[in-house]
Amino acid sequence: MKVLYVGDVMGKAGRLTLKKILLKICLQNNVDIVIAQAENVSHGKGMSISHYSQLEECGVNGFTGGNHSFERQDTINLVSNLNMPVVAPANVLGDTYNNFKIINKNGFSVAIVSLLGYTIPGGYGNKTQNPLVCIDSLLPKIQNDFMGPIIVNFHGDVSSEKVMMGHYLDGKAAAVIGDHWHVPAADERILSNGTAYISDVGMCGALDSSLGVDWDIAIDRWKGSSAKYRMHNNLPYQFNAVLIDVDNTSNKVKSISRIREIIQ
């Protein structure tokens, strides 16, 4: 089974990027299931119902989440609906509906889980549970009902936390996929017990931007301005993802490779 994990879809430019290129990528690589990071889909804050439908039409089968997942009511509604393939970080306490989802497509199935970085981005104070404690309690619940591969998304800034989670879940999850940086890492590999790992997939959206927003405003804010961020929607666009080939019998990964395309 080939699973394509697509990095943070950043606003309108990210949605247009997937519309332009996702089908081609899937056909070229015989992709069975597509998972995308959805916390920035709608103007950088969560995902609206209409934008969910747009990305589903583009070919996305499941959606992971991050620190912005709880900032839009539509996203919360999608996550809380057990029939919708959308998750938010499972280690934000008090939101027990967002633990995991099973994604079924083309006769294949995967479980998806998102975890929020403990140090940064945090953002929920004492509501953010230690992700190691959270995943320890969650894995048995998933495996009680599901015997297929588990994709764990770790949404955080601190590279040491991401690497530790990869090794902690080596042999327990099919893949540990980092995101939130919006900049692709070059450390994709298969760990010793068969789990695929990368520290960050990167993003989909405007290339000539500061992680998807206008760089001039980002610089002004760095200097102390209170100007609001503005999404950058002009070409060129970037597409970043990882392709994971999972053995259908062992649930271990045979290969992981980065995919990066620039759309002019």
Image (cartoon, rainbow, N blue to C red):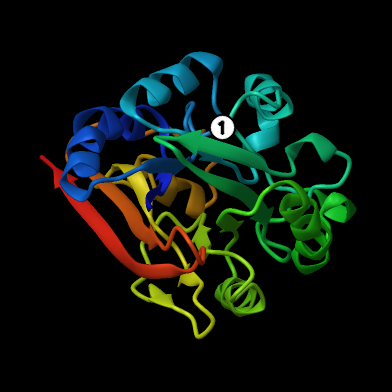
Is residue 17 rendered to the left or right of residue 139?
left
Q: Nearer the viewer, residue 224 or 218?
A: 218
Residue lying farthest bottom?
192
Residue lying farthest left?
264
Q: Nearer the viewer, residue 38 or 4?
A: 4
Q: Which amino acid type is marked by label 1?
A: Lys
Is residue 224 rendered to the left or right of residue 15?
right
Across and down, in percent, residue 120 comes to 67, 62
Residue lying farthest top?
50
Would residue 73 be seen by someone viewing this image from the given angle? yes
* Up/down of 111 relative to 51, above or below: below
* Up/down of 46 relative to 209, above or below: above
Q: Quadrant of residue 193?
A: bottom right
Which residue is at 39% across, 76% downward?
189
Tell how many labels: 1
* Up/down of 67 relative to 260, above or below: above
Which residue is at 49% across, 22% downward?
52
Which quadrant holds the C terminus? top left
How many neighbours does mark 1 have within 10 angstroms: few (below 14), some (14-19), or many (20 or more)? many
Check disc 1 and report the residue beneath it.
45
Across and down, in percent, residue 61 comes to 45, 33
Which residue is at 63% across, 26% downward?
75
Across and down, in percent, residue 241 comes to 34, 53
Would residue 123 be seen by someone viewing this image from the given angle? no
Across and down, in percent, residue 250 comes to 51, 67
Identify the element where label 1 is drawn.
loop
